Image: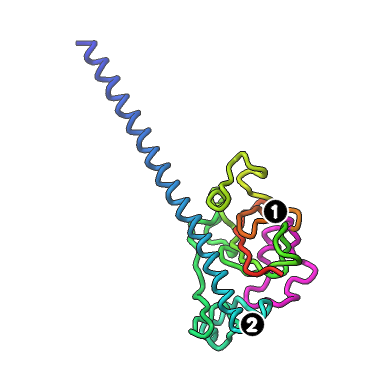
């Protein structure tokens, strides 16, 4: 009788252990799926912004004249140089709201898209680039973005393809989001001509102070 009692206890313990293992496995699998979807959504949103930039530029706008004004949306259809002019002759887009789960700090003021000009990248463009930027991301999101884009792994150099920018989070987010001109950055232009991964016009990187950001080039000159 005692033997059956011991066997019963072992069986109960085994069932509890297996339930915990499978529950954890399901949870991990769910997180991986969410991570992949979130990361691919950021990449797709970046591509959407780049297409809209090309559309607005096609209405005879200089690339440096295109602005990123989200503060006066009601007036946007009056400006053919605004990225968010959705009239049929311009074909801009509505502002894109990123998935809040993408960000390392919930509710941070920088959790939004930016458009920066005069950004120098490693072996991308001759002089400088106009770049769309989404800062403040989770490290896992940044890794997954680079894995999807470049197949980067932990054995990559740098790890997961996450290179470190010369600019801080403040540098990447210190510009006016309402308009861009050829002198918008002036002497504070971000120079990553030797910092970021060579030839990467789209990817995820780390600021000099440890924040993660996605970037994609809208225009190179």
Query: Which residue is depicted at the point 52% across and 58% down?
Result: 106
Q: Secondary structure at mark 2?
A: loop
Q: Residue placed at 73% from the left, 74% from the top?
A: 184
Residue 198: mark: 1
* Quarter of the rendering occupied by the N terminus: top left
Quarter where residue 188 is shown: bottom right
- The quadrant where residue 63 appears: bottom right
- State how the image is colored: rainbow
Q: Measuring from the top left, give residue 156's x and y in whole percent.
A: 63, 42
Question: How far apart, in angstroms, are the residues tagged by discs 2 and 1?
Answer: 29 Å
Main secondary-structure element of the magenta-colored stretch: loop
Q: Which residue is mark 2?
A: 61
What is the quadrant of the C terminus in the image?
Answer: bottom right
Disc with the residue nearer the chain's start (2 vs 1): 2
User: Which residue is farthest left?
Assistant: 1
x and y percentages locating residue 211 in the rendered image: 63, 54
Residue 168 coordinates in the image, percent (x, y): 70, 58
Q: Residues within 10 Å of mark 1 (few under 14, many from 20)?
A: few
Given residues 204 and 12, the one toward you in this image is 204
Point 69% across, 51% down: residue = 164
**Span colored in magenta:** 164-192
Relative to 131, residue 157 above or below: above
Q: Is residue 184 magenta?
A: yes
Q: Residue 178: give its label.
A: none
* SS for callout 1: loop
- Could you say where residue 4 lies in the image, as x and y percent from the top left? 22, 14
Q: In the image, 45: left or right of 128?
A: left
Question: Is 216 covered by the magenta stretch?
Answer: no
Kindly identify the residue that appears in the image at 64 percent across and 66 percent down.
Answer: 131
* Within-10-Å neighbours for mark 2: few <14, some 14–19, many 20+: some
- Cβ atoms under marks 2 and 1 closer than 8 Å: no
């Amino acid at each position: 009788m005692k033997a059956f009692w011991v066997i019963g206890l072992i069986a109960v313990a085994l069932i509890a252990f297996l339930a915990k293992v499978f529950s954890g496995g399901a949870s991990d699998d769910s997180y991986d799926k969410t991570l992949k979807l979130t990361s691919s959504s950021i990449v797709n949103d970046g591509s959407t912004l780049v297409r809209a930039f090309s559309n607005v530029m096609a209405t005879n706008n200089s690339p440096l004249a295109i602005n990123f004004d989200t503060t006066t949306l009601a007036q946007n259809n009056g400006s053919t140089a605004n990225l968010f002019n959705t009239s049929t002759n311009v074909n801009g887009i509505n502002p894109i709201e990123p998935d809040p789960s993408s960000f390392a700090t919930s509710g941070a003021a920088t959790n939004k898209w930016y458009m920066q000009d005069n950004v120098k990248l490693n072996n991308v463009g001759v002089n400088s680039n106009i770049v769309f930027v989404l800062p403040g991301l989770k490290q896992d999101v940044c890794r997954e973005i680079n894995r999807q884009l470049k197949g980067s792994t932990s054995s990559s150099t740098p790890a997961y393809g996450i290179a470190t920018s010369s600019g801080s989070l403040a540098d990447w987010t210190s510009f006016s989001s309402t308009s861009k001109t050829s002198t918008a950055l002036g002497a504070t232009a971000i120079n990553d001509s030797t910092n970021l991964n060579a030839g990467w016009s789209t990817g995820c990187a780390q600021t000099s102070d440890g924040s993660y950001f996605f970037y994609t080039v809208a225009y190179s000159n």
